[in-house]
Amino acid sequence: MSDTSTYPLRLPRSLKEAVERLSKEEGTSIDQFVAVAVAEKVSALATARFFEDRKARADFKASLSALYPAFRSRSRA
């Protein structure tokens, strides 16, 4: 990471101990472990938002018609 900034982070003692243990098990620094964990959370939230937006614009009837031709004939009746 060439473009970084610092951020003082306060963690509950038990969480910090877990981060220390897990980062050691993975062979990474605490900073790298926390950065990856934050990146995973940001990615998960962005993915959820993407699919929520797609769902809002979805045409379920057209999708079902394309996937199941039998549905097409029933939906026209």
Image (cartoon, rainbow, N blue to C red):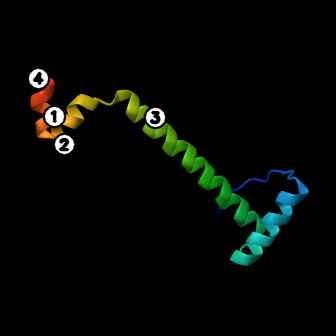
Quadrant location, the N terminus: bottom right
Q: Amino acid at mark 2?
A: Leu
Q: Amino acid at mark 3?
A: Glu
Q: Amino acid at mark 1?
A: Phe
The residue to which callout 2 is attached is 67
- Residues at badges 3 and 4 in contact (C-beta under 8 Å)? no
Residue ranking furthest to the top: 77
Name the spot of residue 52 as percent of width and height, x first. 46, 34
The residue to which callout 4 is attached is 76
Distance between mark 3 and mark 4 Cα atoms: 28 Å
Assign a secondary structure to mark 3.
helix
Mark 2 or mark 1, which is nearer to you? 1
Q: Amino acid at mark 4?
A: Arg
Is residue 3 something that shows in the picture? no
Mark 3 or mark 4, which is nearer to you? 4
Q: Earlier in the sequence, mark 3 or mark 4?
A: 3
> How many residues crowd mark 1 within 10 Å: few (<14), some (14–19), many (20+)?
some
Assign a secondary structure to mark 2.
helix
Depth check: give the residue in front, 55 or 61: 61
In the displayed structure image, the side of residue 26 where residue 50 appears, left or right: left
Name the spot of residue 69 as percent of width and height, x first. 11, 39
The residue to which callout 1 is attached is 71
Q: Is residue 72 above or below residue 9?
A: above
The residue to which callout 3 is attached is 52
Mark 3 or mark 2, which is nearer to you? 2
Q: Is residue 28 above or below residue 69?
A: below
Assign a secondary structure to mark 4.
helix
Q: Earlier in the sequence, mark 3 or mark 2?
A: 3
